[in-house]
Image (spheres, rainbow, N blue to C red):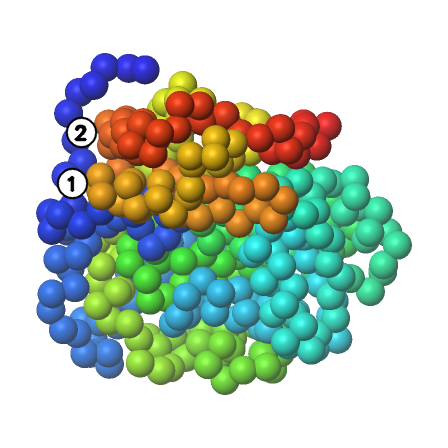
Amino acid sequence: MVSKANSSIEPPRLGEPYLLTPGPLTTSFAVKEAMLRDWGSWDDEFRAMTRKMRTQLLALLGTGKSEYDCVPIQGSGSYCVEAMLGSFVPKDGKVLVLANGAYGLRAAQTMECLGRAFKLLDKGDYLPPRGDEVAAILAEDTAITHVLIIHCETSSGILNPVEEIADVAHAAGRKVLIDSMSAFGAVSLDVERTKYAAMVSSANKCIEGVPGFGFVIARTDELEAAKGNSHSLSLDVHAQWAAMEKTGQWRFTPPTHVIAAFLAALDAHEKEGSVEGRGARYTRNRDVMVEGMRELGFETLLADRWLSPIIVTFFCPASPAFEFQRFYDLMKDRGFIIYPGKLTVVDSFRIGCIGQMDEHVMRKVVLAAAEALAEMGVNDASPPQAALDERKKLAA
């Protein structure tokens, strides 16, 4: 590991634990401070804030931004996924949902609730969907109009091959929808290459804002064509976009304080070097943390080629002295809140790499894990053989 210089990022000023989760996450004091005043939702000043936010988000797209627009939606990320599916998929459309974890499966559940046609490719806990199998499905099922891709599936931490799948979808004449909830802002998503019809993300992920809204970035012609598609009054992306274009206002009460916080977060994101700079810090966070955890004997679910800089899944140790809840409590006592695992076959836990943290904080995470293991009496953090057998499937 590199030298142990002091962190350039201020620790949580109120003394709260670091959130090693894929959002909500640890935010800066400047982001929190931005929420200390009230805003009138119809006031010109707040309308200017909304306009600035939409413009700054579009700027992250690069050269292809002129064909797209940004529509914020109140609610959590799942609200935005439902808004995207309900607005851009016609009632007679059909979606190929690519799932390799909880969020792909949630999208399929959303389609079921919408009462619209879909086909599910379920790769299990962590295997990535690949272009050749998507191509085969699209060739067989000509009713499919859209392909939904999860950019980073945080159930496992895998970074899915979005460009590979988008190329196949476009070659087959299908439209691409992307759930980039936990990756947008830190992992490149080249709009010129993927040419997605629509993409969704959330305020409380890689931009490092707080929960309360998400946003849809879509081609302007797709926004225009979405009129009348939606199943919902409040989740109608076209109606929200049309209202904002006409009046500059949100249709229903906006999360004013959250928008103010997000603008502070966007300014910090730009100062850090935008997507490239933010992604570099998160990648370093991951590399330092993974190296340290492996030195303790922990094993990652994924091989290095699939590891995202967002969150990493570790197998629980085989030692009978290890009990996750106890480990969780000991980590929290030391100032770190980690995430339970979502794997169904073997026990696991996850450690996030995003938020107001750098590599120096991640070294402290590793030290806390070492101390927790020692207090539990775990001398060997290696996983059971069943976990390693699962990992071989991914390598194959």
Residue at the image point whose x is 22% and y is 47% from the top: 17
Q: Are marks 2 and 1 in contact (CB under 8 Å)?
A: yes
Q: How many C-alpha atoms fall within 10 Å of the one at disc 1: few (<14), some, or many (≥20)? A: some
> Under tag 1, what secondary structure?
loop
Q: How many C-alpha atoms fall within 10 Å of the one at disc 2: few (<14), some, or many (≥20)? A: few
Name which quarter of the figure residue 168 lies in: top right
Residue at the image point whose x is 58% and y is 73% from the top: 87
Residue at the image point whose x is 38% and y is 72% from the top: 74
Q: Which residue is mark 1?
A: 11
Labelled disc at residue 7? 2
Q: Give the answer, above or below, for where 347 lies relative to 222.
A: above
Q: Is residue 321 visible?
A: yes
User: Is 17 in front, or is 129?
Assistant: 17
Find the residue positioned furthest to the bottom.
Answer: 233
**Residue 143 % position (x, y):** 82, 65
Q: Is residue 56 visible?
A: no
User: Is 261 in front, or is 325?
Assistant: 325
User: Is 280 in front, or is 378?
Assistant: 378
C-alpha span from label 2 to label 1: 9 Å
Residue at the image point whose x is 67% and y is 30% from the top: 389
Q: Give the answer, above or below, for where 148 lies relative to 292.
A: below
Give the quadrant of the N terminus. top left
Q: Amino acid at mark 2?
A: Ser
Q: Amino acid at mark 1?
A: Pro
> Under tag 2, what secondary structure?
loop
Describe residue 107's horizontal placement relative to residue 4 as left or right: right
**Residue 18 % position (x, y):** 25, 44
Describe residue 228's horizontal placement relative to residue 5 as left or right: right
